[in-house]
Amino acid sequence: MNSFIKNKQISSDQWLASNGIYKRTPHFIAKKLVVMFPGHGSQYHGMFKGFQNEAFQSVVRRADVLYKEKFGEKLSDYWESGELDDPLVMQTSIYTVNVAMYEAYKESGHKPNYLIGHSLGEISALAAGSSITFDTGFEICCIRASLLKKMDKRARGNMISIKTSPDDERILDFVWANEGSCSLSIINNSSQIVVSGRSECIGLLNQYCMENDLKCFILPIPFAFHSELLKEIYDPFKAQLDHLSFGKSVIPVYSTILNRFYRAEDYQQLPQLLAMQLLQPFSFYSCIEQLIHLYDANIFIELGAGTILTKLIKNDTKLNKDIIVLASNAKKADPNLTFKGCLAALNLNTSEGI
């Protein structure tokens, strides 16, 4: 085993975990626990294949029924085929696995202190807090995706992720010079931002970044989320949400676009807020920073497909490092083992806190 680890084929912690042995973080005292739900881009081909958890599978079966009633196909079939690009498939799939993982997680007995969702993930957070039912959240995703699909493809835009600080004058100057064609849409952490804009402008920005030795990546999301380019669907989206039922969450939900917890009166305005989310830029970094420094959060668990949010926090050198960030799933990893490891780490590190 030692030579296997030394050859860097596997870390010592990974080897221990694969054999059912988990480690407690030394001197860590748990305070507040945050459950995070990822949004666009978290889905992947073959996600959760072979995951043996009845609570999870029960939610998936319900989603399959709802999707088949509307569109004649089982939603989960698309996960196996990898045909996840259609907005209807993508958004309902992300929502389904997020909530399904939360149902599986609940069996651990660890009730979160706070909930937060990244972009589309906020609908999952509201469902986890019982502000909406699973079926209502699924309907919201269907409405959202259907309206997006009706947009002229030339008007949808794109998004580009750039490895740089939010105050990088090179990017700010480019955005200012192309006002109306692109805008800063998301601050993911202290060294990663996202710009949304018209496709041709995002193409120019991609070239500009390469010329300036800035690492960048045009996201496989054919819409300029969190920008004014999606304003044409604001009114019809809100109008359809006005007919749905919303209530107050039983667990505090941190809103990314408000950069604060939802208040009692906000739940009455959820149709407006969820529609505004399509247009409103936000700073995920600021939200996490607030949860850590103002609300004593020091354990973060990502529930859903992949490790996007986990990496955003772990890779941020400016955040307080006296925190634990756990992923419940990982691409190309055994979903049963990853989830088991997540819960084991949680149990070990909350024995004297929360």
Image: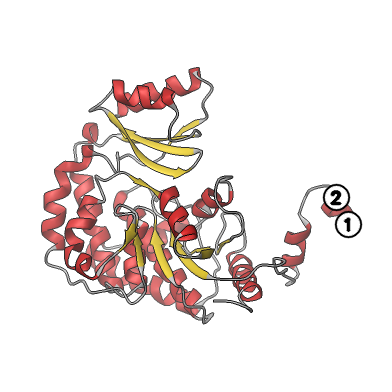
Q: Quadrant of residue 36?
A: bottom left
- The mark found on residue 179 in the picture is none
User: Compared to 223, does 202 lie above or below?
Assistant: above
Residue 3 at x, y percent in the picture: 89, 53
Q: Nearer the viewer, residue 21 or 114?
A: 114
State left or right for residue 208 relative to residue 215: left
The residue depicted at 24 percent of the width and 59 percent of the height is: 142
The type of residue carrying mark 2 is Lys
Q: What's the distance in space between the residues labelled 2 and 1, CA to CA?
A: 6 Å
Indicate which disc residue 6 carries.
2
The percent position of residue 64, horizontal first and vertical second, equals: 34, 68
Q: Nearer the viewer, residue 62 or 245?
A: 245
Instruction: Give the crowd class for mark 1: few <14, some 14-19, many >=20 residues within 10 Å.
Output: few
Residue 74 visible in this rendered orientation of the protein: no
For the residues bearing labels 2 and 1, Cβ distance under 8 angstroms: yes
Q: Amino acid at mark 1?
A: Asn
Eyeballing the image, is 285 above or below 64?
above
From the viewer's perspective, is residue 28 above or below residue 191?
Answer: below
Asked whether 141 or 287 is in front, the reply is: 287
On the image, the x and y values in percent for residue 85 come to 37, 47
Q: Secondary structure at mark 2?
A: helix
Identify the residue at horizontal 14%, vertical 56% (top origin).
238
Q: Quadrant of residue 38?
A: bottom left
Outermost residue on the right side: it is 3
> Which residue is tagged 1?
2
